[in-house]
Amino acid sequence: MRKIGLVGEAPNDTESIKHLMEKKYNSGFEFIFMLDRLNGSKLDSQKTKRFLRIEYESKNPEIVIFIRDLESVLPNKKMQTERKLYFSASNSVVDKKGIYLLHIYEIEALILSDIEIFNQIYNSKLSPVEDPMFIEEPKEYLREREQNYNESHNPEIFKSIRFEKAF
């Protein structure tokens, strides 16, 4: 069994990506959560790098996927540079076995890429978005249009999102 480590900004994000990845990589892979008690910008601290190294050595994943939100639409050179620096520093801690998964604005943009599933779950009638990468604040976009939506629902939503639509 190949271990894939997941490091993200929030437990909802890492669990959501786990559900999505299991659709494509459902046999022979074990997805494990790393640094699951550290959220958001805490991932950027030097202290966190030490914790990452300890978990990396104890859990021994073959690959580590670093899941981050850009918190901006493209182009945003400043934010892209910050995220690239984060990845480079973190990747060196895991012996360069990292893969960088950067969400343009935030993970909810992936929900917008498969809006039919969202509509089924919430019995909504949201129109398809031409390019979710250009929606500023997709979480708020969903909240404004569907009162019952909450980001804590993301792991359940991602169980149904189609891998091919999201990537």
Image (cartoon, grey):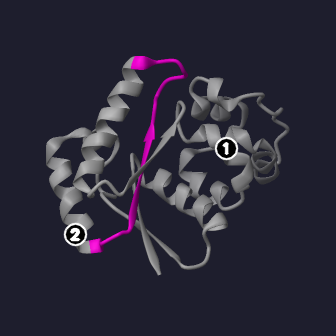
133 vs 159: above or below: above
Q: Nearer the viewer, mark 1 or mark 2?
A: 2
For marks 1 and 2, give the CA distance. 33 Å
Q: Secondary structure at mark 1?
A: helix
Q: Is residue 76 magenta?
A: yes
The residue identified by callout 2 is 57
Residue 159 vs residue 3, the one in the foreground:
3
Q: Position of residue 139 (x, y in %)?
A: 58, 35
**Is the residue 164 above or below the residue 21 in the image?**
above
Residue 65 x %, y %: 43, 54
Instruction: Tell me, yes or no, whether the two marked residues, 1 and 2, touch with CB atoms within 8 Å.
Output: no
Span colored in magenta:
59-77
Relative placement, left or right, of 138 versus 93 is right
- What amino acid is labelled 2 in the image? Glu
Residue 145 lies in quadrant: top right
| Residue depicted at 38% across the width and 68% down the height | 62
Residue closer to the observer: 139 or 132: 132
Residue at 25% over, 39% down: 44
Side of 15 where 154 appears, left or right: right
Residue positioned 54% across, 21% down in the render: 74
Q: Which mark is residue 111?
A: 1
